[in-house]
Image (cartoon, rainbow, N blue to C red):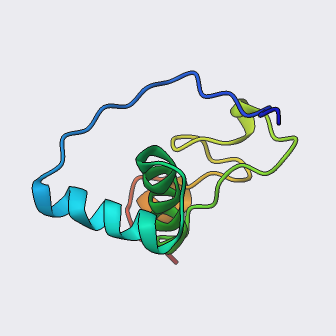
Amino acid sequence: MGNDLTRGERLQIMLSPEELAAVDDFRFKQRMPSRAAAVRELFRLGLAAVGISTAEAGMKSGDFGVFSTGPGSSRSQLDGPPDGTGKKG
C-alpha cells in the first residue's frame, strides 16, 4: 500500500497532559492510526471551523496562502480588505 502524500515539514508542539489526553481521546474515538494523524485531522477541522479551506487537488502552492489575496486565500477572511481599514463591507 503506497502513500503518495509527502510531508516535508516537521512541526513540534508541547502539550499539557490535559491537551494530550484530549488528542488521544479524539484519536481512539475516531479509530485513527496515530497521534500525528489525529493532530492533522484536528488541525484541518479547526481551520474549516474558521472558514479556511485546505488546498484542492491540482492547486499550486502559489495559488493558496495566508498572505495572498487570490483564490483559496484566507486573507479576506482574517484581515478584511487589502486597503488596511479593517472594515468588512
Residue 85 lies, in percent from the top left, at 38, 60
Q: Residue furthest bottom?
A: 89
Note whether 63 is above or below 75 in the view shown: above
Note whether 31 is above or below 12 in the view shown: below
- Label total for image: 0
Q: Name the quadrant containing residue 22.
A: bottom left
Q: Is residue 27 visible?
A: yes
Question: In this orientation, which residue lies closer to the viewer: 26 or 54?
Answer: 26
Note whether 20 is above or below 6 in the view shown: below
Residue 45 lies, in percent from the top left, at 51, 67
Q: Residue at x 43, y 67 (%)?
A: 28
Q: Residue furthest right?
A: 58
Residue 11 lies, in percent from the top left, at 38, 31
Q: Residue at x 46, y 56 (%)?
A: 38
Q: Residue at x 65, y 54 (%)?
A: 54
Q: Is residue 42 left or right of residue 15?
A: right
Residue 16 lies, in percent from the top left, at 11, 53
Q: Residue furthest top?
A: 8
Q: Is residue 80 visible?
A: no
Check the picture and name the quadrant holding the N terminus.
top right
Question: In this orientation, which residue lies closer to the viewer: 69 or 85?
Answer: 69
Q: Is residue 48 left or right of residue 62?
A: left
Q: Residue at x 54, y 52 (%)?
A: 33
